[in-house]
Amino acid sequence: MYIDKELESLNYEKVKQNIGGIFFVSIAMVIGITGNLHVLCVYSFRMKQSNPRIFILFLAALDFITCAVGMPFIIIDLTNPLTFYAVTACKVLRFVNYFICLSSAFILLIIAIDRYRKVCLPLRQQISQRKAVYCCFGAFGVCLVFTWPAPVLYGYSTVNTTNPNVTGIRCFTEDIYKDTDYQAYFNVILILVMFGMFVVLVVLYALIAKTILENDKNRNSFQTNKLMTKGTNVGNKNPVPEERMLKQLDTPKTAELITGSNRSTDDKRIDFNRRSVMQYKRVKTTTFIMFLITVLFLSVISRILFSKSLLISTKTSYKE
């Protein structure tokens, strides 16, 4: 009885130290649930079918699960740093957090590849909507390979306290694995995978930015040359009027047909150029939006990892 009261007292003291982390995670959870529900509703019913729509829906669903399941677990863990007895919940929720973080990172990588092909390789075969869905589910399979050790390594973990007669229980590396290197191997592998994906993302978006800048430069140069050519033609003192050229034709009907054909060709060329410019602007705008989403989700992943670092910090022994 004395030990239980002492443990509760020590747990309460530790919870007071975690108030900042609890408040931070709570605010992020409320904002995340509200925002992701809004995104899921809008993109499910109001947006047209496209690869960006598919990717955003997958990311929003993953982040919603993180906010609705993972973050409450983090709050529970922060409020029970010495009295966490739900071993099964510990294993499941640790796995969910790792799996969702890694899955989100892989989908961000797929988005970068899709944008790279759209901008840098526009004439090559693009990723279809069906392939985009398959790629996302394939990313889940790859993440399972990397995150399956989480429910094995995490679970019942004893923690020393300031009272040598009282031992706390928390959700961290199980006692049987504390003296092994398995946890270190697991962390190193995840860090290498995340770092590798980060490098690939930086390279792909750097190539995309370079291509967009070159395209804009070429378009501006083309427009300048076109205006200069037009100005030269206007300044010509002996222009050949169109009527004069038509008079040299054999019949008026032939002249009308050729004139109509030329105008039709010009209209088609203008319409094609207008559509090309609009399509290029859409691709550029979508790419910029996807880049912002990538930055946002990387910050979300960092937020979750930061929350986990708070949990890790509480595993140390409590000594006077």
Image (cartoon, rainbow, N blue to C red):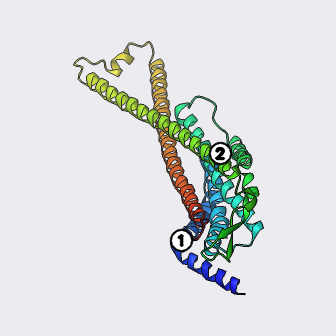
Who comes first in sequence, dot 1 or dot 2?
1
Question: Whole-percent x and y of residue 127?
Answer: 65, 38
Q: Secondary structure at mark 2?
A: helix
Front-lying residue, 262 or 39: 39
Q: Quadrant of residue 110?
A: top right
Asked if 92 appears above or below 266 in the picture, the reply is below
Q: Which mark is residue 217?
A: none
Asked if 64 appears above or below 194 in the picture, the reply is below
- Residue ID at (43%, 32%): 215
Left or right of 65 in this view: 223: left
Question: Whole-percent x and y of residue 8?
Answer: 65, 82
Q: Quadrant of residue 40?
A: bottom right
Q: Secondary structure at mark 1?
A: helix
Name which residue type carries label 1: Ile
Question: Whole-percent x and y of residue 141?
Answer: 74, 46
Asked if 19 appears above or below 223 in the picture, the reply is below
- Residue ID at (69%, 47%): 136
Disc 1 to disc 2, C-alpha distance: 31 Å
Which residue is disc 2 drawn over?
Answer: 189
| Count of picture labels | 2
Front-lying residue, 95 or 179: 179
Question: Whole-percent x and y of residue 32?
Answer: 57, 65
Name which residue type carries label 2: Ile
Left or right of 244 in this view: 174: right
Asked if 142 appears above or below 252 in the picture, the reply is below
Front-lying residue, 199 or 176: 176
Q: Can residue 143 be seen from the camera position used here?
A: yes
Q: Which mark is residue 27?
A: 1
- Residue ID at (56%, 44%): 195
